[in-house]
Image (tube, grey):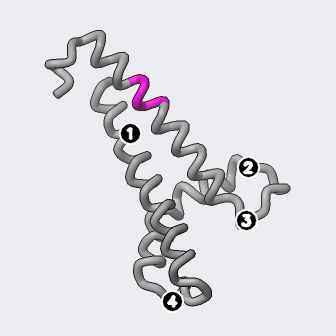
Amino acid sequence: MLLFVSIVKLVAEIALLAIAGQWLLGLLAGAKRETNTFYQLFQVLTRPFVRGARLITPKVVIDRHVPLVAFLLLAFAWIAATITKISICVQIGVQQCQ
């Protein structure tokens, strides 16, 4: 169980950092962000999470806001995984969690 929670936490961390990096690079690159190689790499990394967020959001939510929804869902998943990992580590002992 601890391994599964750790994997979920790690995937959420990577996706959160990729979405944040894509947003920041989009601000810095401006209108030419679509031709930026690193921006395209971030798009590839975040595409599964953004598509998943698009599937569960209503059609009223515009496509421009879907990455924010994906970021918030991943943040909640990260918080839940962190709380679960802490509770598991308290139950089995902190020494065994390292």
Is label 2 in contact with label 3 (beta carbons under 8 Å)? no
Seen in the picture, residue 97 relative to 8 is either above or below; the reply is above
Magenta-drawn segment? 80-84
Is label 4 in contact with label 1 (beta carbons under 8 Å)? no
Seen in the picture, residue 76 relative to 95 is either above or below; the reply is below
Q: Secondary structure at mark 4?
A: helix
Residue 85, percent across and down?
Answer: 35, 25
> Mainly helix, strand or loop, the magenta region?
helix
Seen in the picture, residue 30 relative to 56 is either above or below; the reply is below
Residue with the mark numbered 3: 63
- Which residue is found at the position 56% from the left and 89% from the top? 32
Q: Amino acid at mark 2?
A: Thr
Residue 9, percent across and down?
Answer: 38, 39
Is label 2 in contact with label 1 (beta carbons under 8 Å)? no
Counting residues from the N terminus, which is met first, the one under dot 2 or under dot 3?
2
Q: Amino acid at mark 3?
A: Asp
**Front-most of 86 and 49?**
86
Crowding near the residue tagged with mark 1, few <14, some 14–19, many ≥20 C-alpha atoms within 10 Å? many
Q: CA distance from mark 2 to mark 3?
A: 10 Å
- Which residue is found at the position 20% from the left and 18% from the top? 94
Crowding near the residue tagged with mark 2, few <14, some 14–19, many ≥20 C-alpha atoms within 10 Å? some
Image disc number at residue 9:
1
Residue with the mark numbered 4: 35
Q: Is residue 23 left or right of residue 53?
A: left
Q: Amino acid at mark 4?
A: Thr
Q: Is residue 55 left or right of residue 91?
A: right
- Which residue is found at the position 21% from the left and 13% from the top? 93
Counting residues from the N terminus, which is met first, the one under dot 4 or under dot 3?
4
Residue with the mark numbered 2: 57
